[in-house]
Amino acid sequence: MGAFSIWHWLVVLGVVIIIFGPSRLPSLGHDLGKAIRGFKDSMGEKDITPVDPQNDQKRS
């Protein structure tokens, strides 16, 4: 019930092809891959800004 079947994905692919056209699909896939890779990279980075709770209390 909650999972999508192959037919659902084929309909979605058909709609995407109709909207964007087959010539723009490779660039859309490339841009989506770059966005996902950038998101994963930013999630893996540590926050290098030290948090000083005493500094926050002085500002209040």
Image (cartoon, helix red, strand yellow):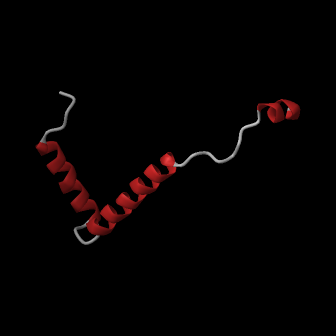
Seen at 40% across and 53% down, the residue is 36
- In the image, residue 20 lies at what x, y percent? 29, 64
Above or below: residue 60 compared with residue 24 = above
- In the image, residue 33 lies at what x, y percent? 35, 59
The residue furthest bottom is: 23
- Along the horizontal axis of the image, is 53 left or right of 47? right
Above or below: residue 39 compared with residue 60 = below
Front-most of residues 4 and 17: 4
Front-most of residues 4 and 30: 30
* Quarter in which the C terminus is drawn: top right
- Along the horizontal axis of the image, is 2 left or right of 33? left
- In the image, residue 7 lies at what x, y percent? 11, 44
Seen at 69% across and 46% down, the residue is 49
Seen at 27% across and 65% down, the residue is 25
- Along the horizontal axis of the image, is 37 left or right of 18? right
Figure quadrant of residue 24 = bottom left
Seen at 18% across and 47% down, the residue is 9
The residue furthest left is: 7
* Quarter in which the N terminus is drawn: top left
Front-most of residues 18 and 8: 8
